[in-house]
Amino acid sequence: MSVFTEQTRERAREIIARYPADRSRSALLPLLHLVQAEEGYVSPAGVEFCAEVLGLNKAQVGAVATFYTMYKRKPTGDFLVSVCTNTMCNVLGGQEVYDTLAEHLGVGHDETTADGTITLEHAECLAACDYGPVMTVNYDFFDRVDPQAAVGVVDELRAGGRPMPTRGARLCTLKEMAVQLAGFADPREGAVADGGPGEPTLRGLRLAEQHGISVPGFDPNTPIRSKAEADLAAAEAKAKTEAAKPAPAAVAAKGGDGASAPTAPAGNAGAGEPAKPEQATGSTAPDVKAPDDKSPQVRTAETRQPDAATAVPDAPGTKLPSDTAPPAPRDAREAEAAGVAANEPAGDGKPAGDSTGAQERNLNEASADAGGASPAVASETGAQK
């Protein structure tokens, strides 16, 4: 465990102190970034360190570290170069960029150059299709690269330079980036300077400005309402709409020629109401909107997978073919009760291996480092224990 410096241990205590005493395991993600900042990857010693300071077992820490791709499980270069070879970038030349870099650097996917500077990897998608082909260096974008431009970037990195990304802040090493992801400011001068959005990202906005398109009633100075205010406004609008509705017209008991209008069968509320579609056709299917009122996707789904709640064909008042009788309400209730009994709700207990001892120790150390400014936290932890 001596691989980690005292500064790393102090930062670990600071990270843990950000969370409530009984939720300190939430500090695991930034702690993994912290140990990666120390070694350049999450080593077995890093897993053991996180488990010790949080009172977890190594299996719990390893399960998280292997789930997220930003946590590297073997030594990684100072600069992680990722080339998108997914469909859009591939069509635009992404695979050619990757192949050129692999040949130039003499490494393959997830391999590091002998000088430890560059680690090269395929990337499934870098979420920048409008800038393809794209390449990232420690997750900062280099847009519309070609093989020669990509080679120029890696050569500058190996020579000790820091080429400026197309978008984003100035480049930093993988370890420097991991410190930021752990929640600590980058001390370099101008570390978050420069950058800005690319032109394709702003294209829609510029077209809207050019053609005078805007959201109706949009006011950029309007403050965002809280949920309570929004709910209140919605309720007031609904009440106003309901009050503005005209009273339903009385149904004439007889037609204009003196003949009686069709009336609903016995049991209907209101003896003079016209018969409903299902009463007129004898169908038990619910009334549905006409096909033209539905989207093609809804009509297709209802036609392919009809059930007792969907009319087939898609028209009001059509009877549904049924091969078997629907289950009686009593059978449905019994089946639901059996399912509930067989699936007991999960408890609130922590997984095996969790303990409050290590958490309490680290919180006490954090309080001591702060000059005993938060003894209430420690006392609260002791009470919970």
Image (tube, rainbow, N blue to C red):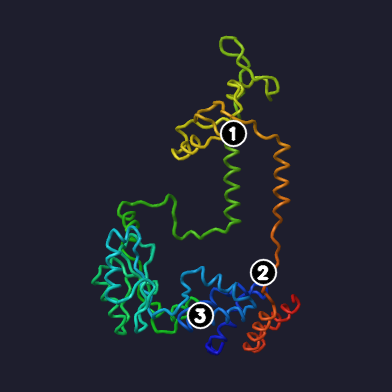
* Residue at x 62%, y 89% (from the top left corner): 369
What residue does disc 2 label?
Answer: 351
Judge the density around disc 1: few (<14), some (14-19), many (≥20) Cα neighbours within 10 Å.
some
Q: Amino acid at mark 1?
A: Ala
In this rendering, position of residue 59 left or right of residue 132: right
The residue closer to the viewer here, 87 or 288, is: 87
In this rendering, position of residue 385 left or right of residue 208: right
SS state under label 2: loop
- Return the mark for residue 43: 3
In this rendering, position of residue 71 left or right of residue 265: left
Spatial CA distance of label 2 from label 3 is: 23 Å
What residue does disc 1 label?
Answer: 308
Spatial CA distance of label 2 from label 1 is: 43 Å
Q: Earlier in the sequence, mark 1 or mark 3?
A: 3
Which corner quadrant holds the N terminus?
bottom right
Q: Earlier in the sequence, mark 2 or mark 1?
A: 1
Q: Amino acid at mark 3?
A: Ser
The residue closer to the viewer here, 220 or 122, is: 122
Q: Residue furthest top?
A: 258
- Return the mark for residue 347: none
Whole-percent x, y for residue 304 in the image: 49, 36
Q: Amino acid at mark 2?
A: Pro
Q: Are marks 2 and 3 in contact (CB under 8 Å)?
A: no
Q: Is residue 322 above or below residue 161?
A: above
The residue closer to the viewer here, 105 or 302, is: 105
On the question of residue 134 being in view, the answer is: yes
